[in-house]
Image: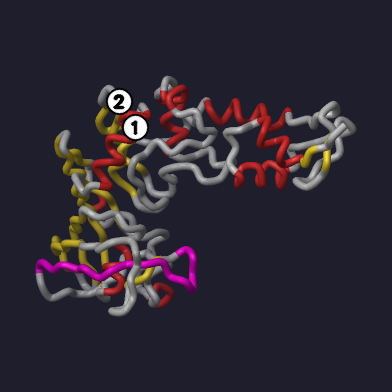
Amino acid sequence: MQQIRADKWLKGAFPSLTRRHVHEVFEKGWVKCKQGHTLKKGDSICPDALPEVEELVCFLKKLRTGNAALPIPLVVEMDDFCIVDKPPGVPSHPLSLFDEATVTHWAFARFPLIEAQFPAIQPTIVPHRLDTWTSGILIVAKTQEAYQRWRSRFISKEVEKKYLAWCWGNPGKSRFVIDTTILHDPSDRRKMKAAADDEDSGLGTALTQVSILQQRSGYFLAEMMCKTGITHQIRVHMACAGFPHLGDKLYDPFFSSRAIQPGYHQLRASVLITPEGEFKVDTSVFEKGLDF
């Protein structure tokens, strides 16, 4: 009888698992032979001696029920989407199979009907994203149609986004525009960087409009508006202009010597201006600078 590799069997038995998920399941040791021995991806198995995956089955069932314990405020609810105020430290969407504390899992628990709309094991149901430590306004789609509608709007730049950020320095002017091209940093896959004059990012032009709201001793509060959504756009733009965010260990080269060292970068998504109206979250606490 022809044998089959254990990883190919798992993918066939659970077709919604991605390649990354399959790797993670084997790393976890959740694929075992009848005798209880843990199998590796490359091990061969007989079709009449199928592996045991009870732990995986139980975990997947639990995963799809969501996570009702996440403290994510609901700002606006519509028929096929809602607006939430994402706290800092909560990822917008899952990456690993074992991510259980994202906005997606909050939505599964809050709106059980969503689960049937998104059959993927770890689906993305937010049509735009915020960094894990960026707080603020986020759209959550309840249906596939709503997800695609909002994705199209963001791609076609029909949505304007406003952010608030506490930044180091003193710009010396009340308004300015940053249009530096952004590309991936080849020296650090976690980062983006401002492109040199002869570099083409392939990501399109990024433009950020900046208005200064408060100036304090050595740092300031700014409002930024952008239609583009390049990864880390505002953080990179402000850092390359000489005004990195307070608490931004990734983009502030002087973070370790700063007099103020918040636990995360001080950036809050505050407003979305959309074809369906303008949506806002409360920013009063953030504007007082109470997080640092």
Q: Residues within 10 Å of mark 2 (few under 14, many from 20)?
A: some
In this orientation, which residue lies closer to the viewer: 4 or 279?
A: 4
SS at mark 1 in the image: strand
Residue farthest to the top, as pictured: 113
User: Marks 2/1: CA distance?
Assistant: 6 Å
| Residue 40 visible, this orientation | yes
Q: Residue at point 52% right, 37% down?
A: 122
Tell me which segment is drawn in magenta.
174-190
Estimate the x, y position of residue 124 in percent, counting from the top left: 43, 39
Which callout, 2 or 1, points at the residue further toward the start of the chain? 2
- Label 2 amino acid? Asp
Of the pair 171 and 35, the residue shown nearer to us: 35
Farthest front residue in view: 2
Marks 2,1: beta carbons within 8 A = yes
- Residue 292 can be seen, yes or no: no
**In magenta stretch: residue 189:** yes
Q: Is residue 247 above or below residue 53?
A: below
**Residue at the disc numbered 1:** 141
Badge number at residue 131: none
Indicate the position of residue 201 as horizontal and vertical percent values.
34, 67
Residue at horizontal 44%, vertical 21%?
112
Say what secondary structure mark 2 lies in. loop
Where is residue 279? Give x, y as percent. Answer: 19, 38
- Which residue corresponds to mark 2? 80
Assess disc 1: are there few (<14), some (14-19) or many (≥20) residues with their C-alpha within 10 Å of its C-alpha.
many
